[in-house]
Image: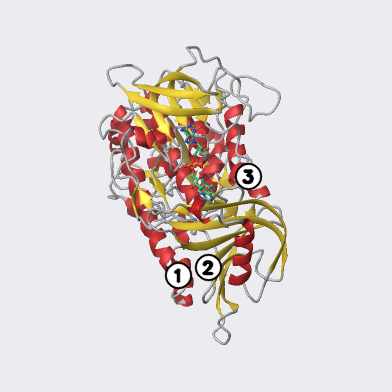
Amino acid sequence: MQFHLNGYRSGDPDIAEAIDQPGPKDEVDVLIVGCGPAGLTLAAQLSQFPTIRTGIIEQRPGPLEVGQADGVACRTMEMFEAFGFAHRIAREAYWVNEAAFWTPDPDQPEQIIRSGRIDDVEDDLSEMPHIVLNQARVQDFYLEVMRNAPTRLTPDYGCILANLTVDRTQDFPVTATVETGGNATTIKARYIIGCDGARSAVRRAISLKLTGDAANKAWGVMDLLATTDFPDVRLKALVRSASEGSALVIPREGGYMFRLYIELDKLSADERVADRDVTANDLIAAANRIFAPYSFDVKEIPWWSVYEIGQRICDRFDDDASDPCVFIAGDACHTHSPKAGQGMNISMQDAFNLGWKLAAVLEGRSPPKLLSTYSAERQAVAQDLIDFDRAFASLLSAEADPAKVQHYFTKHGRYTAGVETQYKPSIITAADTHQALASGLIIGKRFHSAPVIRLADAKPMQLGHVASADGRWRLYLFADEEPPIDESAPIWQLCDELLANAPKDADLDSKLDVRATFQQPHRDLSLEAAHPFLLLAKGRYGLKDYEKMFCVDPSANIYKMRGIDPGGAMVLVRPDQYVAHVLPLNANADLQAFLGEIML
Ligand SMILES: Cc1cc2nc3c(=O)[nH]c(=O)nc-3n(C[C@H](O)[C@H](O)[C@H](O)COP(=O)(O)OP(=O)(O)OC[C@H]3O[C@@H](n4cnc5c(N)ncnc54)[C@H](O)[C@@H]3O)c2cc1C
């Protein structure tokens, strides 16, 4: 973490200096509807930009206090790292390290037995763990980021979006009608984002429909404090009984609480789960039947719910392919079962994909066409999820072969960890012409971090952790084998060219944050001989940035771990941590041509 660049400031460096945002309160650049995981990820991202006026409204009277989703995938933790709170979540959360499988005992099918136990996350899939934490707590961390941001963004609670209209001839094309305490007012916005859940009013207003399976599925979910003789209550456990249905155990943060998901019968086409009058006692009774011969003596139920799930998706996530100003994200555009723990994760990743794009366009750093990539990229990801969820759900049905279930779970561990998302070639994702130069940093997939040693202060760290959620592109230079102080070395020449291309009217890394990694051990390199572009003078005092250069960690060599060619490579990474391009060190012209399409 870097601070004090423009002068010493005492106190918590996570709390940015507040700025004034002039302008009427009912006129914003971005209006976000809904304070769920999607809305708050977007708000936390946009709150970092002093020139962008963001509003966020929520129909609830205050922050979510309990319940809903709880699984946080490794990939989401990588994103939390960029927001600066991954380590705090990791401390508080339950870590999912192993998963257990329980199936009917072949000798006594009315009883379950453990049929397998596997690692939940394969080695080196991510530097981050797969964790479980209450959605309400995850949301608290975002609210804190927003409060501490320069814009001091806070949600307007008790505020319901009733309607919206769009008139593209206006500077602020969106007019939203919102109701607060029975009074209707309007808010004008350049963009409106519906993060308003499965019954989205924004989706309705732009006439998009969730389509998919009509046969909805009902789930009972309970957070419990209970005593039990079921031995795997502190492991994620998939339990399938012979005739009483399936259940999922999710151990929870704090060491004592656990969650049970109980699959209920299918609902008929026009039936709502509320019509069933399911009670918490019904769910406990069902759990005791599924888990026989084990049982639960429930002491307290901090939260429970019964909710219905259809595997449904919208065919686009915005209102216009070429000039979108209304977007939907999260459950507003896709719903599916909670079995694979994806709901909250995919919703947050939708918002992270959109946030930097909105910021870049609103700040005039990128052309508006960038916004069309949101629906194209995220609709494909959601469609994959729907397909995966359907296959996963049928595998957990009573007839499925236990070995197949376990195999499927293992095979798709990367997918559920969130690291398999791969965006197709577009204006922000290049073709894979030079992929072989960094075979483990795959174009279109998230930047897969690895250990390095920071040159200036010998700090061992993860290279990917230099990426904060500040909307900047990152260029990782992996030097060739020659000493980087040699002016004829490819890395030196590239730095000369990058310096010539850097902005003249702001800090040189304000648009593109360049970081270099060298193959030599850190004690063999002299900092002062490095190229000046890697020791940038920045800020009002022209202080040097000592955190641009890294060396391999001999105990975990990033070149070997990520298949980086000893002749070096450039890896361009988007602000949402996805690899956009891989190029040889002598291809600055190609790099500038690519960036020229998307940076003004
Ligand atoms: C009751 C319930 C239980 C769930 N349980 C689980 C679970 O156990 N496991 C799991 O994996 N997933 C669960 N989910 C799904 C999971 O919570 C979602 O996938 C995830 O929260 C999606 O995030 P989101 O931000 O897209 O939407 P949401 O979290 O639904 O957030 C939408 C927000 O928008 C607000 N809103 C809606 N309409 C308006 C409006 N017109 N004006 C203003 N505000 C509005 C809502 O109050 C809400 O706060 C559950 C969802 C619900 C609703």
Task: Give whichever of discs 3 and 2 has the lower sequence position.
Answer: 3
Q: Is residue 523 above or below residue 142?
A: below
Q: Residue at x 37, y 51 (%)?
A: 312
Marks 3 and 2, how far apart at CA: 24 Å
Q: Secondary structure at mark 1?
A: loop
- Residue 397, numbered circle: 1
- Residue 66, numbered circle: 3
Tell me the kind of residue under disc 1: Ser
Residue 3, percent from left and from top: 61, 28
Q: Is mark 1 within 8 Å of ligand 1?
A: no
Q: Is residue 281 above or below residue 538?
A: below
Tell me the kind of residue under disc 2: Ser
Tell me the kind of residue under disc 3: Val
Q: Residue at x 55, y 30 (%)?
A: 545
Marks 1 and 3, how far apart at CA: 29 Å
**Quadrant of the rendering where the C terminus is positioned:** top left
Residue 188, percent from left and from top: 41, 19
Residue 42, percent from left and from top: 48, 34
Residue 549, percent from left and from top: 52, 39
Q: Secondary structure at mark 2?
A: strand
